Every structure is written in structure tokens, then in C-alpha cells.
Amino acid sequence: MHSSGEPHDEAPWSVGFCDCFSDMKTCCMACLCPCIAFGRISEIVDKGSTSCGARYILIMCITGFPGLYSCFFRSKLGKQYRLKGGCYGDCMRHLYCEICALTQEYCELQNCGLDMSIGWHANVEKNQGLAMAPVVEKGMSKEMMMMG
């Protein structure tokens, strides 16, 4: 539900949270090099504006819990693609099993037709017709803006 109390359509994730081993290559990357998996996810979620792999490593070294940072990108991904979940659940998943969370997010973006190895800008060039518009929050309609 939105904060306004109105329900909105949320789709289920295309891969289950505990389906890490269904894509061994991605699971191994998330396990052995989580900063690479997270960096690729964050670049796509932020539409090429940032690469957060270095921040991820810093937080991992300082706190031992990189999920404190990566869970916010899961929430952002969920909002962009209208996936089931919420901030609390997203953070709990990252704190419970960072590898499973990163694997699920990485596979979700791949299943949306993105090539995670080439980054945001190359995906936009490669897939001109790919629907990548951000989710628009409820607000003033175009007609209301024209009237004002």
C-alpha cells in the first residue's frame, strides 16, 4: 500500500530469495566478490549515475555488515520494477543473507533483459525499446498542471 492507503500492483520476484543455487555463476560472484555483484546492481538501479562498489567495500571493512548499505538499493530496485517487498523486509534479507539477496537482485535484473556485465549506458544503447522509465509517484496529473 502507498502511504495514501491506496493499493498498488506489485509483482513477485522472478527468482526466489533462497534460489541462489539456480544460477551458480551469479551465486559464486555474490559469494566470492560481493562488491562486484553489488556494484553492477547499483549502477543499473542508479541508471549509471553511480558505482557504489567502493562504498560497499568500505562499509564491509568497517562494520562487517555491507547489507546496511545494499538493502537501500534493494528497496530502490523494488520500487522501480514494482516488486513485492518493503524497506524493513529488504533490510532484513540483506542482514540475514547478503549472498542470497544480491543473487536474487542480480538475477531479477538479468530476467528483465539487462546484461549486467556491460553496465547501464551500454544496456540503454543495446536495448533502445527496453522500458526503463522510473516509477512515477502519485501527484498532480498533467491535466491539473496545465490548468494551473
Image (cartoon, rainbow, N blue to C red):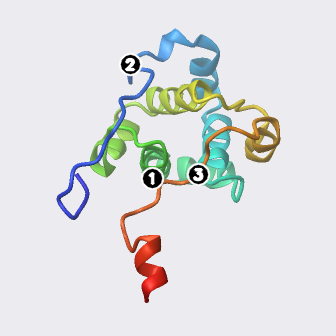
* Label whose residue precedes the other's in the sequence (3 or 2): 2
**Closer to us: mark 3 or mark 1?**
3
> Alpha carbon of mark 1 to alpha carbon of mark 2: how far?
20 Å
Q: Tell me the quarter of the image containing the C terminus.
A: bottom left
Q: Which residue is mark 1?
A: 72
Q: Position of residue 119 (x, y in %)?
A: 75, 41
Quick one: label 2, few (<14), some, or many (20+) residues within 10 Å? few
- The quarter of the picture where residue 117 lies is top right
> Alpha carbon of mark 3 to alpha carbon of mark 2: how far?
29 Å
Residue 122 position (above or below residue 104): below
Quick one: label 1, few (<14), some, or many (20+) residues within 10 Å? some
**Closer to us: mark 3 or mark 2?**
3
Nearer-the-camera pick, 21 or 131 = 131
Residue 110's label in the rendered image is none
Residue under the point 63% across and 34% down: 37
Residue 18's label in the rendered image is 2
- The quarter of the picture where residue 67 lies is top left
Nearer-the-camera pick, 7 or 65 = 7
Which residue is situated farthest in the left direction here? 5
SS label for mark 2: loop
Q: Position of residue 52 (x, y in %)?
A: 65, 53
SS label for mark 1: helix
> Alpha carbon of mark 3 to alpha carbon of mark 1: how far?
19 Å
Residue 133's label in the rendered image is 3
Amino acid type assigned to the residue bearing label 1 in the image: Phe
Asked whether, in this view, residue 32 is left or right of residue 68, the answer is right
